Image: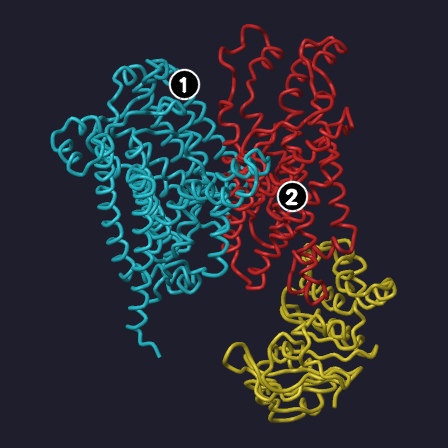
Amino acid sequence: MAYLSGANMTGGYGDADILHDCTIGVERGEIAVVVGPNGAGKSTAMKAVFGMLPLREGAVMLDGEDITALMPQERVFKGMGFVPQTQNVFPGLSVLENLEMGAFIRDDDISETLEQVFQLFPILAEKAEQPAGELSGGQRQQVAVARALMTRPKVLMLDEPTAGVSPIVMDELFDRIIEVARTGIAILMVEQNAKQALSIADKGFVLVQGQNRYTDTGAALLADNDVRKAFLGG
Amino acid sequence: MNTPSDDTKKRQERNLTLFGVLVVLFVFVGMAQSWNVSLAILNLCLISAIMTLGVNIQWGYAGIVNFGVMGFAALGGLAGVLVSMPPVAASWQAGGPELLLGGAIIMITIVLAVFAASRTQHLGRWRFWIIVGVSLTGYFLLRMLVDPAIEAIESINPAKAGHIGGLGLPILLSWVVGGIFAAGAAYVIGKASLGLRSDYLAIATLGISEIVVYVLKNEDWLARGVKNVNGLPRPVPYEVDLQVTAWVAELATTVGTDVNELSSIIVKLCYAGLFIIVLAILLWLFETALRSPWGRMMRAIRDNEVAANAMGKHVTAKHLQVFVLGSAVIGVAGAMLTTLDGQFTPHSYLPLRFTFLIWIMVIVGGSGNNFGSVLGGFIIWFFWVESEPLGLWLMDVITMPLDASNPLKMHLLASAAHMRLMTMGLLMLLMLRFAPQGLIPEIKR
Amino acid sequence: MTDILNAFVLLANFVLIPGLAYGSQLALGALGVTMVYSVLRFSNFAHGELMSFGAMFCVLITWGLQSAGISIAPLPTALLALPAAILLTIALALITDKLVFSYYRHQRSETVTYLIVSVGVMFFIGGLIRFIIGPDDRVFADGERFLLKARTFKDATGLSEGLAIKTSQGVTIMLAFMVVAALFWFLNRTKTGKSMRAYSDNEDLALLSGINPERVVMITWMITGALAALAGTLYGLDKSYKPFTYLSLLLPIFASAIVGGVGSPVGAIAGGYVIAFSELLVTFAYKKVISYLTFEQVVPEGLVQLLSTDYKIAVSFVILLIVLLIKPTGLFSGKTI
């Protein structure tokens, strides 16, 4: 059983199920990537793991504990962090305030975490007093990831962190994500740029129509001819 | 399992019961208080019902929040004065041409300002100042040319006239003119503000209606402002004439009532007859419209504006149509009210009474259903009037054990009259919470 | 030189001082509207009545204090009654939320539903107020009437124009300044204040950050209630307390909030003063000022007034409309606190 896992998840909004017996998960210090074509239910699976989608069947386990019934906020307290795909910063608040709000549930001293985050994303230290809404797309994604790190989560879930950023910024973001994983945090993310994502992934899940099609290590998936042809553009 | 026709039947039975209760209420007031009171309430109920119909087609059919009911009703009332009062020749001599010129200046200024606004988008900040410049120039020209004329008009026999008078035509004509006035105003307002978000539209229309009433209160040359216009001609006979008519006297002896009271009842019945005709025509028109493709489209737009827009429906244009139509109906009702009152009193136009109370009628009656609106108009007006005696009675019962000189009892009795605001608010909140569809819900077709 | 001073004092006496006081009252009212808007996302039509409610309790408590012989002269006794009135208004705001608004919040109702519901609340509170205190005009200002009397000013300066500052005006400006400073400190410097701004900025993300929405809403109503009671009392102290006037005050307050940009506290304050000074400047008769500043011969005959004072409040409606039609986001393009 993985550190965080959503096992055999079935469910959707209203009557129609989007996920059918779908399983994803990640170990501590590893990066797991969920890829697949548009409408495969990748983001839905993430939401299900974070408790933003009611499940009819299946269970979400964190460190051996069943958290299927918990509200998203309660999962934050359990050590999970989530970075939504869009609207993932507080645009009217300064970068520093964004980070402080990330640490809202903490009552202890956050200056050490702030320092770590600033080390990881030096540009944020520079722009600390600027409203997040005024930053560029890539910088905003950094704020979003940094905000989620402020709770010192054990698991970080990222929903398409590189959506809408330039290739250079994307590479940089991936570097940062690897660094985060090295600190022992489990990273589960959905990516549109499947090739690049799988190349940094310890584990990969290929979803099609809400079902697992392929599950293997990132390298193995990249090497698999069928996967390459069908999902990675040859 | 209920078949659809069973449901329809049940619904009809329910509605009939609701209207039946109303009839009983009116009869009860007729017996307990007097038939004059009962009919007086009935007449205002009819007018309220028409105003409610107007708001209902805006809100219930199309989801437009019009908090400017008061302004449209006041414009309708103004039509009553401008159509029916005899013209004041001296006023027209003293300042007629200047007034017409002033009207022309206003038109030209508006046209120029709108033209400037639509053609100067590329000029950035200059655009604002160009529009301001045009408007201010127009305003100062207007003041310079028209101020002396207004002063001259207002000084002509200020005790009785002091305004331009009207056209001296039958007042029934004003019901149409009132509708046209309101429709014209609604066209301009709608053009400018229907694109706003619902709460901004609500605030904007509320503000506009206040401005309309402010103008009516302060522009004495138009309709005497707060000095009121009294003695508007009537579409029905006068009580004094009826009292000396032979058949009335005969009828009074046969029924065994006072001639004065009977004549007053006859007058009220005449008004009621006229109002019922208008209400019936409007109801028929609106029911037909609701069933037509036009009505279906309106509801489609209301329920999903985005989808309707995507299907190529001109949502804004349709909204404008329905806004103008609904406001025209309110204008008609406003003119009818002035006709019934026989006077035009700008200070009596209060948003609580003319805008928000009408909204309560729509909510309670059932938005989206014309019969619901009519029922809401009747019930709410009935209780608006009768809640005072009811409240007094209630307080009397509650404070029975207390001595007559007990300060709490005296305070409660004195405050009973204000119960109705609270009752209305409570009723509205309860309906919104527990029966948001209203007494007669919209029929999903 | 004296003439220029005289002209300035004239303007200060009839425009500057009353404008600052009235503007502060509007600003406090608009701040309340803006707080509710940015957190609960609707325009609260009951806000005028909330102000009236606070002012009413201030009147009642002031009467009680007066009859008990308690006074803080030269300051008005109402200031002593204010804290209790504020607490009662906060209680009312919280009760209304619990009984009425929370239901629609959990239903995730549309803005327009809230709007109509708030009209119902407006009726109810309005009726409650009239039921408790009646519809009549109540004067409850006591203590020293003036901080600075026109005569004193004339004697001291030797100018022919006098400058008078009413105690109520001085108190209004002082209190408004203090309260606004405290509010800004709260919103920008405290964790709770920041969490309110975060919630109003991005509700979903605030939930993901563990911010408790019910707490944010509760604090919003507490601040709103306090601001409303303060604004209502100061307005009543300055003019006189009359339940009826607070509904007409609602539009200038909305105007202030919208002109500044709904949701922006800075905007609400700026909007309040813009509206107040516009009303006064547009309806001020400039004849005397012009006669001080120019020669006898060029002074025009009329009052040199842009608009008659009858239209004073209408000015705010006109500004409101212009802003709504030209730049609905307001001067400060606000959406969040």
Q: Quadrant of residue A43?
A: bottom right
Q: Could one spot residue B362 in this view of the protein?
A: yes
* Label 2 crowd bin: few (<14), some (14–19), many (20+), radius 10 Å: many
What is chain A's hue in the picture? Answer: yellow
Q: Which residue is mark 1?
A: B147
* Cβ–Cβ under 8 Å for marks 1 and 2: no
Tell which residue pokes out farthest to the bottom in this image: A225
What x and y, as percent, mark residue B302?
A: 40, 59
What x and y, as percent, mark residue B72?
A: 37, 39
> Camera-side residue: C170 or C239?
C239
Question: Measured along the vertical axis of the image, is residue B269 above or below residue C313?
Answer: below
Shown in cyan, the chain is B
What is chain C's hue in the picture? Answer: red
> Camera-side residue: A86 or B320?
B320
Residue type at mark 2: give it: Leu
* B95 left or right of C275 in image: left
Q: Quadrant of residue B208?
A: top left
Residue type at mark 1: give it: Asp
Q: Could one spot residue B317 in this view of the protein?
A: no
> Camera-side residue: B274 or A15?
B274
